[in-house]
């Protein structure tokens, strides 16, 4: 399905000549973000799409190339498991290859994440199982962001933005969702610390709201809970407008329904 993105950029400027890294880009919200971003980048820009499925990433790359006339946009597909050191290192390595090019914008969107088991608190007695979840949902975002920051040091004229794709459950506790709530809350604080440390980096935790994704299908299967869902493109467009307007407080947490 063709993403309806051209109207989003009108009146809000562009992302300039930059590099954008999107994790969890192969489907759902990450895929919608890729469509939004590619229309906002200018000649000489680079888009890094990161996910576990190389096949889905290649399909996305072909979609982007067919939906736009921006053949000059360099798109790298990085099939990597970000829960591993190798996956994080490979993503940073590919980004480093592009560091020699002159750019005026770096945008990192930490979208990769998982729902994890929905179960009562007392069921989490397996330390390895818990650590595996936290590694993918917290540690990988920290180490990847740190690696990309080292690759593209802040300098005059360089706009640096980091997005943490969050959830309302970073702020609210929900019974049986111990791992998910913990990971989202930890990520929110982690990126708030980044905003305090790096005043030249604009940091946003963005809760995209209930979207029509595989995760929502999994929630419905597991819990029987269903929400009124909306297309991923709608929330992706709203995030892009936030980034282009650039009038949010760095380190803050914004929900789809608040903006």
Image (cartoon, grey):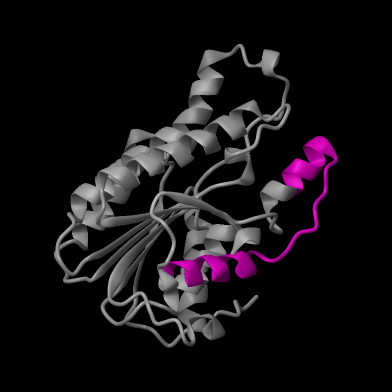
Q: Is residue 209 left or right of residue 110?
A: right
Magenta segment range?
Answer: 217-243
Residue at (40, 38) in percent of width and height: 190
Residue 153, placed above or below residue 145: below
* Magenta span: chief secondary structure: helix
The image quarter containing residue 238 is bottom right
Q: Nearer the viewer, residue 121 or 252?
A: 252
Q: Is residue 104 left or right of residue 79?
A: left
Residue 204, placed above or below residue 85: below
Q: Nearer the viewer, residue 88 or 253?
A: 253
Q: Is residue 27 visible?
A: no
**Residue extending furthest toward the right:** 224
- Rendered location of residue 251, percent (x, y): 40, 49
Residue at (69, 13) in percent of width and height: 122
- Rendered location of residue 113, percent (x, y): 53, 43
Considering the image in quadrants, where does the C terminus appear? bottom right
- Rendered location of residue 151, percent (x, y): 20, 52
- Rendered location of residue 182, percent (x, y): 56, 30
Considering the image in quadrants, where does the N terminus appear? bottom right
Q: Is residue 231 visible?
A: yes
Residue 243, placed above or below residue 66: above
């Amino acid at each position: 399905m063709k993403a309806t993105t051209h109207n989003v950029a009108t009146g809000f400027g562009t992302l300039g000549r930059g590099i954008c890294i999107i994790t969890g880009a192969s489907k759902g919200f990450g895929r919608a973000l890729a469509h939004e971003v590619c229309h906002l980048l200018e000649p000489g820009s680079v888009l890094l799409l990161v996910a576990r499925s190389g096949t889905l990433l290649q399909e996305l790359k072909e979609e982007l190339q067919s939906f736009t006339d921006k053949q000059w946009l360099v798109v790298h597909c990085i099939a990597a498991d970000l829960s591993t050191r190798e996956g994080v290192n490979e993503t940073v390595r590919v980004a480093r290859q592009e560091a020699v090019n002159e750019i005026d914008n770096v945008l990192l969107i930490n979208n990769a994440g998982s729902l994890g088991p929905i179960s009562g608190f007392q069921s989490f007695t397996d330390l390895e199982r818990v650590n595996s979840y936290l590694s993918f949902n917290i540690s990988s975002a920290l180490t990847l962001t740190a690696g990309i920051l080292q690759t593209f040091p802040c300098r005059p004229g360089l706009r640096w933005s980091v997005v943490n794709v969050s959830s309302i459950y970073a702020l609210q506790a929900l019974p049986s969702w111990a791992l998910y709530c913990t990971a989202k809350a930890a990520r929110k604080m982690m990126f708030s610390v980044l905003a305090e440390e790096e005043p030249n980096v604009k940091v946003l935790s963005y809760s995209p709201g209930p979207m029509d994704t595989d995760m929502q299908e999994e929630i419905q299967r597991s819990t029987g809970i269903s929400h009124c869902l909306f297309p991923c493109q709608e929330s992706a467009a709203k995030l892009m407008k936030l980034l282009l307007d650039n009038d949010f407080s760095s380190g803050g947490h914004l929900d789809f329904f608040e903006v």
